[in-house]
Amino acid sequence: AEPAPAPGSGAGSDEPKAPRLTERETEVLRLVAKGLSYKQIAERLVISHRTVQNHVQNTLGKLQLHNRVELVRYAIERGLDGD
């Protein structure tokens, strides 16, 4: 017998481990992975520091991660830290 799918995983989804991030969340994630500070990210994307924090918090929630270090590791594993 096959194991039951994990609770909360979308039925029929090929990649239950890849929640959908918005383009902006992905962009912020990429810059965090490159080592930019929230202030630098805010300046580069012409958004407020608070907005950068909100994007990071939303991304952490979607990915079920707890902090910036885990977020960077996630991004690097997916090759998001390159150009």
Image: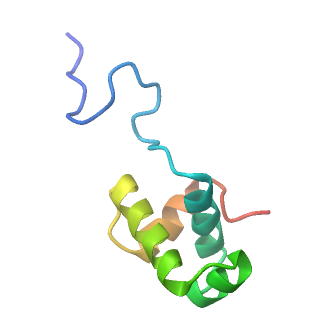
> In this rendering, would 81 be left or right of 60?
right
x, y percent for residue 71: 47, 67
22 lies left or right of 65: right
How far across and how far down the image is residue 74, in percent? 50, 59
Quadrant assignment for the N terminus: top left
Looking at the picture, the colour scheme in use is: rainbow
Residue 48 screen position, x and y as percent: 57, 83
Name the residue at 69% across, 85% down.
43
- Look at the image and tell me in which quarter the C terminus lies: bottom right
Using the image, determine if residue 46 lies above or below residue 13.
below
Please name the residue shown 50% across and 76% down the image. 51
Q: Please say if 8 is above or below 26.
A: above
Give residue 76's position: percent from left, percent from top.
60, 62
| Total numbered labels | 0
50 or 35, nearer to the observer: 50
Question: Please, which residue is most extreme toward the right here?
Answer: 83
Answer above or below: position of 7 versus 32. Answer: above
Query: Measuring 44% from the left and 44% from the top, which residue is drawn there?
Result: 19
Residue 57 position (above or below residue 42): above
Q: Residue at x 46, y 78 (%)?
A: 53
Q: Residue furthest top?
A: 1
Between 59 and 79, the one lying in front of the other is 59
